[in-house]
Each structure stands twice: as C-alpha cells, then as structure tokens.
Image: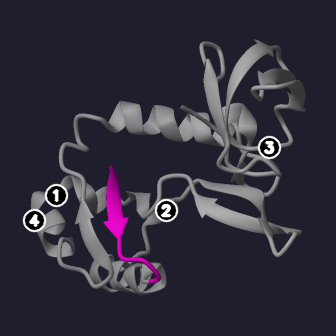
Amino acid sequence: MWIIINFKTNQFDILKQEFKKKLKIEPNFFFPKLKFQKIKKNKLVPYISPLLGNYIFCFHPKFNNENMLENINYLKGLKFFLKGFKIYQTDILNFMDRCKKHEDENGFIKQTFFNFTTVEKIKFLSGPFTNMIFKIIKQNKNSFEVFTGKINISFPTKRYLFEVV
C-alpha cells in the first residue's frame, strides 16, 4: 500500500535507514523532481527541486497493518504521513503514472506535465524571466506567445518551466 509522508529536510537518508530497521526491507519510494536553470551571478546554474516539496510516496505491503502504521509514526526523520491514504490509492497511482509519463530519460519531470489548455497567466520558474508573470495571448503544442506589457514574445514550451497563476 502507498502512503504519502512528509519528511524532515536533509534527513531522508536517515529516514530510509529507519524504515529498513523497522520493516526489515526498505520500502519503495517515488520522489518526482524538476530540473531547471536559475540565474546566479549572471550565469545559468542547474537547479533540482522536488515537485512536492518534502512529501514523498512510499510503498510497503506492511502498510496495510494499522499497528505497523502506529510503529512507523515516530521514526527519526519523519514529520508525519497523510491520513486517508487507504481510500485514495487509485488517485495516488494515477498521479504517479502521470508523473512517470512526463519524465525525461534522467527521471525529471518535463514541462509537458503542466497542462496549459485553459491557462491565461503563467509565472516563469526558470530562464531569464524567472518569477515574472505574463498573460498568454496565443498557445499551441510546442510554444506560446505572451504579452509583456509592451511587446509580444514567443517561447518554446519545452525550454522553460512555468506555473499557472
């Protein structure tokens, strides 16, 4: 059964060891990540960011047992796990499948994960316009055109990361 856990920053390796001690077998983890570039000191620097922050998907057959869940609730490195995961197993699997469909060859989530069918405004997460918000004028499968207030600019969707505003 899959659970969703929130772990303490920089303690994921400790948490993995604690799981292995408690469960005798290390559980499977699914941790979707984004890779993009940020500008630091006028240079583009690669940057990796977790898609879900400090949340991670974790699978082990023993998670069906309520007593086991009580035992893992206090593992070192674990903040908490989300309640109600049993009834949302289908939704969890669907989300994970969607992430896997949009992964590149290195396991990072591609821009295609973010659907722009009804989007009016976007905020850039990478590139020269990081943290700037633009209104979308025109979009197609591989690019879109935004209005900056003075001029229209066209961008390829695969090159930059965005979020819907």
Q: Is residue 114 at all visible to an observer of this figure?
A: no
Disc 3 marks a residue whose amino acid type is: Tyr
Residue that protrudes farthest toward the front in the picture = 150
Residue 39 vertical placement versus 100 (above, below): below
Q: Which residue is mark 4?
A: 67
What are the residue bounds of the magenta stretch?
Answer: 1-10
* Mark closest to the chain's N terminus, 3 or 2: 2
Which secondary structure type mostly characterizes the magenta part of the structure? strand
x 43%, y 59%: residue:
56
| For the residues bearing labels 1 and 4, Cβ distance under 8 angstroms | yes
**In this picture, residue 98 sits left or right of residue 159:** left
**In this picture, residue 49 sits left or right of residue 154:** left
C-alpha span from label 1 to label 4: 6 Å
Q: Secondary structure at mark 1?
A: loop
Q: Which residue is mark 1?
A: 65
Q: Which residue is mark 3?
A: 160
Q: Which residue is mark 2?
A: 29
| For the residues bearing labels 3 and 2, Cβ distance under 8 angstroms | no
x 68%, y 49%: residue:
125
Residue 36 vertical placement versus 80 (above, below): above
- Magenta-colored stretch includes residue 7: yes
Disc 4 marks a residue whose amino acid type is: Asn
Depth check, mark 4 against mark 3: the one in front is: 3
Where's residue 136, x and y in %?
72, 20
